[in-house]
Image (spheres, rainbow, N blue to C red):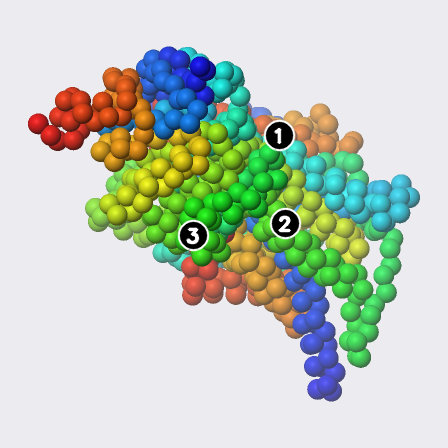
Amino acid sequence: MNSRIVAFILFAAMLLVPLTGVGKYPLHLMVTGLLWAFIYTSWSIMGRLGLVSLGHGAFLGVGAYTVVLLWNLWGISPWIGTIAAVLITVVLAFIIGYPCFRFRIVGHYFALVTLALSEVVRLVIVGLREQTGGSLGITPKSALTDGVTASLSAMQFSSKVVWFYIMLACWVGALLVWRAVDRSMRRMALEAISEDEDAASSIGVDVNRTKMVITLISATMTCLGGVLYAQYQLYINPETVSGIGISLQMVFGVIAGGMFVMLGPTVGAVFLLVLSEGLRIFIGHDIHGLDTTIYGLMLILFIIYMPKGILGAALEKFGARAPGSR
Amino acid sequence: MTAMLRLDNISAGYGSFQALFDVSLTVDAGEAIAVIGPNGAGKTTLLRAISKLIPVTQGDLSMEGVRYNDIAAHEVISMGIAQVPEGRRLFPRLSVEENLRMGAFIPAARGHFDERLEFVYSLFPRMKERRLQLAGTMSGGEQQMCAIGRALMSGPKLLLLDEPSAGLAPVIVQSIFELVKRIRAEGYTVLIVEQNIQQVLKVVDRAYLLETGRIRMSGPAAELLASDEIRRAYLGIA
Amino acid sequence: MDQIFDIFFLEAVLNGLLLGGLLALLALGLNLVFGVIDVVWICYAELIMFGMYAIWWLHAQGGLPLWLAFPAGVLFVAVLGALLHHLVIRPVLSAEPINQMLVTGGVLFFLQALATVIFGVEFRNLGVRLPGVSFGEMNVSLARMIAFGVAVAAIGATYLFLSRTYLGTAIRAISQDRGIMPLMGVNPSKIYLTTSALGGAMAGLAACLLVLQYDVHPAIGLSFGPITFMICVLGGLGNLIGGFVAAFLFAQFISVGGFFFQLEWGYVLAFAFFIVMMFWKPEGILSKRR
């Protein structure tokens, strides 16, 4: 009961933060943190059930580029664009997921197949360079001209406060989805599946269908994350929203925070953000790439010495057994 | 007379689970010794301890008077101890000859590869016929022969056999124990672990009875074969 | 008109063949390590990238003649491979398989960033110009032909090593039954280290061949890393023969696809083919390692 009250207080505090007059940069950090927390949580819905994808960059990229391209090329509202993006995502997730689950392609194979998918999405984006600007990236055409500060139809808002509340709502939504998936009957079935598929099948659980649904949920949410990213950052390029780099970063974020705990991915997002911003500030661009070197080194050390993640390790230390961890 | 293999008060197990308690036994050069006992008695554990596949928590292992508790598992074969593990454990996708080659991996054995190969093929003519066949495609009896041959390739002084008759048809089992006799005749010292008490006691000089990790009885094979306790408990003879 | 079309098409096919040899070498290294140690080196391409930098640095910066720089490069990456295993992979060998993959992913980040710090983001060229060779109307780069020849020779040498030597046989054996290796007098850790060094050496060799044809920059691993993974998965992870065949197949897709469309579409085509194969013959992917 105590933790519930604490959570409520914290949440109320978060709601009030933008109203305290905190500066643009901290607000930007919080918005970005919430966005990545949303994306990482989306990934972890699959990851915690043993479906480790190294290719979620594909869905992120599809989300980001679909809305921007449809808007820039044909003036189609990002809301419609989102629907298109989700449709593409669903198709992609299905193409990859169905054969993998049907033919029990799991583990290393599954991870590498997803990795290939994200790379192919990146290549398609680069290949369509006339439309997408290739590696140089692209910016959605601004609807905020002539003093207009917000456009709902264009999904563009100049106020970071507005974006804060949007991201907060989405993040909470992701947590609710996480919990719903966690609690549903499928959870019991899936824990059985991750232990022994054949046994699970024998008690009438449609293993493949369940895996497919989880995959679609995770992919769709990530796609939405891509849409949000594009509309907020107002600049995307193939490397930051698709491909192996961002895909790996998602996985790292979840692992660093703790894969089997609801708030694990969020902790991971905050941690990675603090880490990268901190490194950038203290080491910065004097020696180009030094911050990322340390970043990479820390990630290696994390996997070796803290595989349960920050939150997972903390929970263990304080007695609570991380739920669902094997 | 110093024994070849000597176990003094050996305790060993798997993590927190102890499987062997205070086990002592000796094997003299040229002898054939059996360790018999029921399932789960710790017989395989005993051989694993001797080969240092599992650590020994108490007691001393010595070979030809030299204590070897502190060497690594892969160094045991250089002391002249070779094991034919339970279940044959051939490399299924290597050929018969490649399996035999693995038996001669240690540098000391490589120089003698050709002559030992000839010897093994003379013991097992069928192996020579199937030298290029993948080991995993052979029958159980053939695999057992190959596994024994593989152990012989290192030119060991002491040969450990873990349940050589397990899972084999009675006719094959016969031939396996004939083989053991032949190997003995060639001068090898043998330690066999077996559940097939009747057959093995006919082939060895002495035997130890291992029950739940402890030595309960020991003595000449004929004695054990005639003992009431063994006959009642294991041979089903009232 | 038709004849010219045919010639260029043939040229693409030939280039695909030559590329296939190189990709087969890449796949071999990755498959070998996976088959023995059961770990996928996600950072495999980055090892090659560092090898390329090493050779460039020794030759273009240090003035070392190529015939010395190349072996040095191979040795360098072999050591990198052994270090990778000893420092990074060994500690997580008993952890979940995904952790093992991820830790090499961390190394990917690390190596890319380190290369940026040390060498900067500019494209570096070895400064060696090899001529083209003409077969009638077709032009093929000599560098490519050399790469093909060396790659095939290396693959052949590896095959002989694995099948004819004690160590090679032990490497094949350990993936079939690790537990009894000590009974044969084989130290499994030593085999893992040796295999890692061997995988590194193959990467180093690939670096020699690639640096003759392409400029090196920190992100170059992205150009051939993912395609190598795709090849290995299609041929069956750990399946040395499968990887060999898949490499040539993919190379044709890339080369011919790139001939008809832009380069990127060749890769996309290869991936589409891969997806089709997954639906059609998943056993090809599931075939167990040799």
Which label number is shown at residue B125?
3
* Amino acid type, callout 1: Leu
- Are labels 2 and 3 on one chain? no
Q: Residue furthest front?
A: B185
**Sequence-earlier tag: 2 or 1:** 1
C104 or A82, which is in the foreground? C104
Type of the residue with mark 2:
Phe
- Answer whether residue A71 is visible to the viewer in this image: no
Using the image, name the chain to which the residue with label 1 belongs: C
Residue found at the very far left of the displayed protein:
B238
Foreground tag (2 vs 3): 3
Q: Are marks 3 and 1 in contact (CB under 8 Å)?
A: no
The chain containing the residue under callout 3 comes to B
**Residue A71, image x, y percentages:** 57, 58
Query: Tag 1, which secondary structure?
Result: helix
- Say which quadrant the C terminus of chain A sits in: top left
Given residues B111 and C230, the one toward you in this image is B111
Q: Secondary structure at mark 3?
A: helix
**Residue C270: which quarter of the image?**
bottom right
The answer to whether B15 is drawn above or below residue C47 in the figure is: above
Q: How many neighbours does mark 1 have within 10 angstroms: few (below 14), some (14-19), or many (20 or more)?
A: few
Report the mark closest to the observer, 2 or 1. 2
Across and down, in percent, residue A154 comes to: 54, 52
Q: Which residue is mark 2?
A: C161
* Marks 2/1: CA–CA distance: 26 Å
